Image (cartoon, helix red, strand yellow):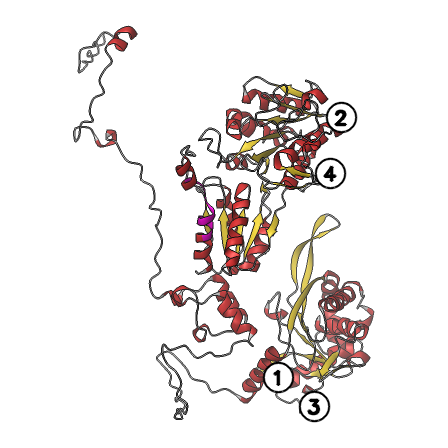
Amino acid sequence: MLAEPPVARLPHPIRRPRSLRELLRNPPRPRPPQRGRQPPHLRPQRLRLPHPRLRLRHRGPRSQILSPLVRRLAKEHDLDLAQIPGTGTGGRITKADVMAVISSGGARPVAPATAGATAPAIAPAQPMPAPSAGIGEEVVPISHIRRAIAEHMLASTQGTARAWTMVEVNVDHLVKLRERVKAAFQERYGIKITYLPMVVRATVDALLEYPDVNARLDGENIVRHRFVNMGIAVSYDAGLIVPVVKGADGMNTIGVARSIADLAARARSHQLTPDEVQGATFTITNPGPYGSVASVPIINQPNVGILSFDAIVKRPVVIEDAIAIRSMVNLSMSWDHRVIDGELATRFLARVKQNLESWDFAGDLGV
Amino acid sequence: MATQQVEAGAAGHGAEPRGKRSEDGQATYLIAIAEALWEEVERDDRVFMLGEDIGVYGGAFKVTEGFIERFGPERVMDTPIAEETIVGMSVGAAMEGLRPVAEFQYADFMSSGFDEITTVLSRYHYRAGVPLPVVLRGPSGGGVRASSFHSINPEPWYAYAGGIKIMCPAFPSDAKGLLKSAIRDDNPSLFLEHKWIYRRIKEQVSEDPEFLVPIGSADVKREGSDVSIITYGAMVHKALEAAEALAHRGISAEIVDLRTVYPLDEETILRSIEKTSRALVLYESYRFLGIGTEVAAVIAEKAFEHLDAPVVRLAPPNVPVPFSPPLEDAFLPQIADIEAAVDRLAGW
């Protein structure tokens, strides 16, 4: 037989419940809060809200706070932020500060403002400080090539009204074509077939259609070229050089491919003659192989435009209300607004795009 | 149809809303909404209205005055004081192919039908494949000394439900065009009319019965270059006033009126940030998890590299809307608060 469970003992005697009438006649008095006697979870607690002024503090001077936009602009325009005086609170560099430097001609070194320093009328000649390498730094003198590039680029950004336009091109059929013919092409012509010669051909056609893009500004006149000398930006160990495919309008794709292969090889082995890097009427840069998908190139003066052919990437695109995967490329152009306008620039790019999307290069490649 | 010129709210029975425009043809926000309802009930036999006191009494704010005389009690249906029933009736009618437009005397009372709205109305299309073309409309917002039961901005609650389009127009034209779009849309929508705007704002409004404003599209109400104020509802008008004052001090503010808060028109928001690089998100729903919280998150996530300063929010605290006028003024963002916030942002 099971033992009877122990009878639970209540701490207090049970009181008879009072009737409502009694309660109303004799309402219970609220008990004062008993400090210290209640267990912690029963004690009245205040709702803790975050302090409205709670902030993460920035350690160090405010001038070192760089907004995401300022960082991006500095990177895009290759600016040395240490050289830009900030006008935001606490000396922070703002968008306006960066834009002022860009619009005045790029990474122009600006002397840091020193408080109360006014230059005397005749300043004693200051000796140029000898380059001194700090710990972890390396001093490399500027090469002639580097200096020439720097001057050319700076002159272009300061001397042109640069604008930029981009179109997207579906090059799916070109990718398939290249895959199909590349072995045979290499076999027959001894060079690799790339997309660049096709882009050159498509661009040459557009330049002949819109001669104002194939032009230069000469004082009070615009000089239109009735021929196309295509500058091709080539990077090599010393920097950047732009050899010229002369008479590109008279070549088929194989001819352009051969010319580019020859010029690029001799550029990289420092064997180009001065004549071969002069006389371009338009320029194409091709940063795609390194993976960039959009570039804002600096115009190669005296040209009025430079076309950038970036990396071909597979992307989902909408074709007749269906989503498909296609090999797409961004084709963009920096152009000089002093000579041409947005409508012309866009029509020109649209023509190049149309050529690339509609032309069948198979016959032109001879394989 | 009578077209005599009479003041809003004092119309004779049977007067169509367009007759209540001012002498020069301008319509208040309230009249624009009444016109949208009138035109849509007239255009489509499937459209009918239901709500508390919308028939004989003409609606708590007199939006539907004159409707029952013109369209009869089957198209302008007075209901019991039972919001859950109103939503339930609307859902059932929509299932049967009708297009109900339910009025709530105050948007605060929509939450009495919360379960029907959030678990039935918002999901039924997903569950059964049957669209519910239901419009729930009512006055929301504060600033009219109406205390905590008649002043709230409930849009975040219903935006969170997913599946309900939510419009909060600030101008008579937008109100008319959006309400007509909502009635013609096959999806459920919540049309929140800001009661502070009802009789305060008027403008020329299209009389074209096919005038529509697309749902989900924001509108730049003022172009500017230094800072973007992204806002909606009554705050648009405060922002416009603040922008005028800021312009005198050389700060150019761009005002983006969201118009539809769900779905958000991210493109218009981001385009503006791309231009100004600075964002003040101004909203009348609560600061914590209000509509602006999502706007700020979208900007931080998708426009990070275009920002030159932190995204700043200006919104009331998460407390009941106070009745006391000084407290309500302290609770709601005021023009001086907007100016101060823009000043801080512009100088950051």
Callout 3, which amino acid? Asp
Mark yes or no: residue B262 visible: no
Label 3 to label 4, Cα distance in Å? 71 Å
Residue type highlighted by circle 2: Met
Discs 3 and 1 share one subunit: yes
Left of B7 or right of it: where is A16?
left
Query: Pointer 4: what residue?
Result: B207
Q: Residues within 10 Å of mark 2 (few under 14, many from 20)?
A: few
Q: Is residue A318 above or below residue B97?
A: below
Foreground pick, B234 / B181: B234
Residue mark closest to the camera, 2 vs 4: 2
Chain ID at mark 1: A
Residue B129's tag is: none
- Residue B6 highlighted magenta (yes or no): no
Density class for disc 1 (Cα within 10 Å; few <14, some 14-19, many ≥20) is: some
Of residues A200 and B115, the one drawn nearer to the viewer in this rendering: B115
Q: Position of residue A246 (x, y in %)?
A: 75, 84
The answer to whether A102 is drawn above or below residue A7 in the figure is below
Marks 4 and 1: which is nearer the front?
Answer: 4
For marks 2 and 4, the one nearer the N-term is: 2
- State the separation of the CA atoms marked 2 and 4: 16 Å
Disc 4 marks which amino acid?
Glu
Q: In the rendered image, which residue does mark 3 sit on?
A: A275
Residue lying at 71% horizontally and 67% vertically, measured from the top left? A342
For the residue labelled by badge 1, is the local secondary structure a helix, a strand or a loop?
helix
Residue A363 percent coordinates (x, y): 83, 70
Bounds of the magenta span? B331-339
Amino acid beneath label 1: Arg
Badge 1 is on which residue?
A268
